Amino acid sequence: MAPAVTHAQAPSPTPTPSPAPPSPPSQPQDDNPGATSVPRGASGSIITAPKDQPPPPPPAPVVVTPPTLKRDDGAEYPHQAIVDKIKDPVTVGLILEVDATGVVKKVTVEAAAGHGFDEAAVAAAQKLVFEPATKNGRPIAAKIRHKYAFAPPPSRIVGKVASDSKDKGIARAIVTVTADGKPGDKRTITTDDSGAWKVEGLSAGTYHVTVQAQGYATRESDEEVDPGTEIDLTLRLTRPNQKPVAQPGDEPLEQVEVKVDRPPREVVKRTLDQREISRIPGTGGDALKSLQNLPGVARSPGLGGLLIVRGSAPQDTQVFIDGTAIPLVYHFGGLSSVVPTESLDRIDFYPGNFSSQYGRALGGIVDVGIKDPETKDKKIHGLAQADLIDARMLAQGPIGDTGLKFLVAGRRSYFDLWLKPVLEQTGAGVTAAPVYYDYQALVQKDFSSRQSLRLMLFGSDDNLKILTSQVNGSDPQLGGGIGLHTAFWRLQARYKNRINDSTELRVTGAVGQDTIDFNIGDNYLRISTVPISTRIELAQKLAQGVTMNFGIDWAYTPYDVAVRFPPPTRPGEPPGGPFLTRPPLEQHVKDSNYTPAFYEELELTPWRGSRIVPGVRVDYTKSSKSWDLQPRFVVRQDLTTGFPRTTVKGGAGIYSQPPTPQQSDSVFGNPGVRSQRSTQYDVGVEQEITRPVEIATDVYYKQLDYLIVQGLGNAGTGAAYGIETLVRWKPDKRFFGWLAYTIGRSERRDGPGQPLRETQYDQTHILTVLGSYRLGWGFEFGARFRLVSGNLYTPANGSIYDEGVGAYLPLTSYPPYNTRLPMFHQLDLRVDKVWTAPNSKFSIYADIQNVYNHGNVEGVSNNFNSTQRVYATGIPILPSIGVRGEL
Amino acid sequence: MRIARALTKVLVASVLAGAALASVVGTSACGTGFDPVSKLQGVRILATKADKPFAHPGDTVNLTMLVADGRADKTRPVTVSWIPAVCTNPKSDLYYACFAPQYGSDGGASDASLALSEGGTSAAGGDAGDAGPQAPVSNSGAGALASIIAKIPPHTNLTPFLPQGNTYSFQVPADIVSSHVPTPGAARPYGLAILFNYACAGHLELVPFDGSGNPLQIPIGCYDDFGEQVKVDDGVFGLLRVYSYNDVSNANPVIDSLTQDDAAVDLRAGITLDHCTESRRRDCKKIKLTPVVSETSWELNPDSNDGQGNIQHEEIWVDYYSTIGDLGDDARLLYDVGAGKIKKPEVDFQAPSDPGEGTLYVVVHDNRGGVEWLVVPLHVK
């Protein structure tokens, strides 16, 4: 709690008029206290005679003295102003009516200042005691002007300096606290024997904290200090050229900074931090696979890496890297994500009802943050990691004394080394064995703690090319030469400037290229796009509790598409037969898509613990020449102050997704289609149970309209609804984990008169329980258990023989996806062991999927004429081992 | 040193784990236990050859069906019956639009052609029995089959009314191309005729639709003398698509010969080999069979390109079937559209454990409706 009492200045120090000179007695109390003829008191008081006083005899000389202040206890700085983070001095002008005994009988506020200042000034003024005004020596009542000037109460930083490897404090460390932009405003303190330190009397603002201790590397930190508050800051120092040596039971401790996060602008925002991302069992430490353990995200079959959010198709969820959209999430459809965990700072996941800053998606939003390079000891650091699939490296640090810092990272798979011979043994000619790589390189310049510029190049490439002499019995065209090359790169610039305490500007621009080159038999799909995008957001604090976010989300995408494929059938319609039974269609299009968007949001905090975010987003789509207006609204309210927090929240909004070039294509799509739309509703509650444990429940309903259906245009409708619950133990020194449960339904109707059917992405129950515990001695043990409804499939019963191609055409049941596979359940374990040594750290992990080797059913295999079927099971027990070294 | 030792252990463990993983994955990738499609144990249509795989409008197309009967009990003879309503240009070229009730009697409203042609003729031959030529009874048009079905009471015995035999002829409507709804993206205008037939060890009856709305319901069933639908090995319902173009034709591939371990096989005499005496099938002797198809059969496909302006060829592959023994693969690619001739297209064959007589069928397809086959006697001593 910030100090409640600061300075109360009474009477008003400014202006400070001179004592009233001898003058004629004042007129009877004047309604115009500001009149220049009215004498003024020493403290700025204006003396007027009460109205009921008889007029003085004109000729007699009158001597009037103003009331003299005898007692002033001062005004208390209002608590509401602290809550509202008022940083500037505030003056409250008052009119006091003082009776002939010197008692204040009435107080009137001249101009309301709000935030509790008026009430504080009035309360203080009512306690003032005056020597009454006199007229020719006789006490009289008087009306005077009085002012209270409130200065924001000082703040303080208290903290501790400790070693990185132990929690033991470091004595006699020198802590320097410098006000941002005021080099002269510097405080230097020495820690006591326990490593504790504090700096008091700080005005609100940003402070640069530097800690130096003999034998340790210098540690720096920037802290934003609000008025009348206390920041508890623990800084851990590392010995230079020496990594902390782990001792039995002595886990490396992470930087712990006690701060309250800003409430999100969305109803649901789930953020995973580095430790959670890298240690969730069964994911192989893969960043984006960890998302599949959160509520609202369906289980992806097998090794697949599909992001199925609240019953939406994978392509309905957008993935961004620091605000720039990317076309691919996973290498080869699920082996690993296109950005290695080591390059990540955080993953923000919004399953629905997201802020107006995001658009063009009916599903969810994933925004991946690439971390800023670390320069804590002004040396270059790196790491290398290898497992059975790929190897990766990362280096980061400062670039000399230029003030620039860099990060480079790369990864390449090497399972082509063993897969190529395996494929060749089956008779396949392997031109290019499956291989993927990705890379990230960035340079950053921090001009100050408020302003930075970052340039980043990142990309990904997957390639596969084989020639198989085996023929697919059910579709002979799916043989011969098969090639798949997918790649993208982006050159991104990001500029952030917190211009002042009220204004912040964020600009991100990117240019890049996406490539898809797929061929099978004589069918192919070749797409090359050059997306250019810009995102500009200006956050402007308009008044206390009112912040406006205005943004431009602009994208221009020239594309070159060449396709040769059989005509697609619409959803819910049985396939027309093998590829080669229908003459393929060809299309070659060079065009561009232009999708500018503008959005504006207000963040309102009208009272304590509240956050109301009305917003609107407008998207234009060149292909349909249409605008989509999308009003959105989010509200959060803390029902309790302090611990344990209870928050209720809700939101509603409209979300549009423009047609893709394929969907509006004149050959393969539906020319003239407009954007698909969803209306999303979400209500929920968050409740802290203990300090690390919180439970959150959300009820969502997503109405889908204007869904694009092949051959029918915007004829589809649907809905997805459910309840998500997350019981989360936030990461602490030892443990993190959560229980996530979702019950939901996803339905579609492909057009008027068509049956309502469940989508292939419908999973009724999704339960994930996971946890990871640091055992000591560098060991960490984690487990994950999942229990999920089986996926839907379309059974086949019998067939027709296609005599032209020698293939049986299964007779599938109707409507499609009407039968559910058995329930999925699986236990995964992970063990990490870390060794630390001077200048280095070495770790290994074993990640074992499906520990009890349960034959989870992932699909159905039919015999050649679909008269017999058996379940096809997914991965058996699957161990994975990795090693990592860090310098 | 401590880290180096740990690293060594980890690398060793990684290699072992990789080997274990490969073995596990390899095990789990084993087959499903189904009999392969190449193993003939019932009544099977193997292919139907059109003398004009791509017909011109107005052409008469002669069809020949290859039917095999791999049943152990052949008490009930197999009859091939042709549905005389030739379905032309069904909606979206979907074969089930020809008979599914929801597509209407014209097989799909606006984009269906109701061109009527004078029907087809059929003649018996081959394994399907010796039913004599039938009088033409067909009309044609998309959904013509649906029209007929709608007029006939369920469970009517259709066999006496249907042309039967292994061959069939029909005339392509003269307007089959012009009446097809223009298809954006198609290389050139085309028309589609779909023929349905049934190889049945019994008689055919009309089967009522179940009202579920599922378009994939076969409207005709094969029944025995007791009015029960026969088992799946006693009948098969088939379809054949014949595409028509004004200006493109295609020839059936030509099989020059069949080699056994690189030596030409006398196709009349067939293949003679010893039965297998090994206790484990995988130890039985394998012979390598390869059909020889010359490059002249690998025709240019003027409508196929690689997306970079290079015209490609046809794809040619071979399907294998046998009534005895085991084939190592059901099908092999002979020519890829771009890469050309496949270097090792051979398939392994293992004799059965018991002596006997059988048949090997080698059916070569191209991806434009062309087909040719060999029927080779198998003598297992």
Image (tube, grey):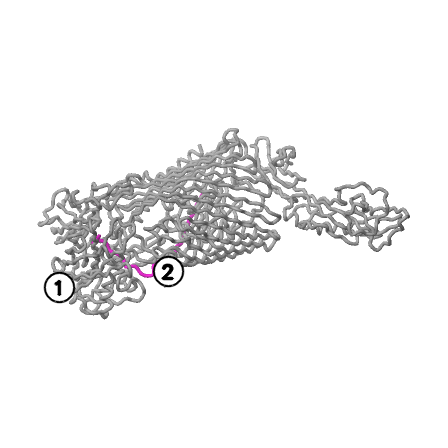
The one of B113 and A611 positioned closer to us in this rendering:
B113
Mark 1, residue position: B134
Residue A850 appears anywhere in the view: no
Disc 1: which chain? B
Residue A261 appears anywhere in the view: yes
**Position of residue A380 in the picture relative to residue A482 (left or right):** right
Number of the front mark, 1 or 2: 2
Mark 2 crowd level (few <14, some 14–19, many ≥20, 10 Å Cα)? some
Helix, strand or loop under label 2: loop
- Real-space CA distance between mark 1 and mark 2, rounded to the nearest whole angstrom: 45 Å
**Residue furthest toward the bottom?**
B153
**Residue furthest toward the front?**
A59
Give me the residue at 38% from left, 53% from top: A672
Mark 2, residue position: A751
Q: Do labels 1 and 2 touch, CB within 8 Å? A: no
Q: Which label is found at residue B207? A: none
Helix, strand or loop under label 1: loop
Rendered location of residue A862, percent (x, y): 28, 56
Stretch of the chain drawn in magenta? A804-831
Rendered location of residue A178, percent (x, y): 62, 35
Rendered location of residue A823, percent (x, y): 39, 57
**Position of residue B21 in the picture relative to residue A687 (left or right):** left
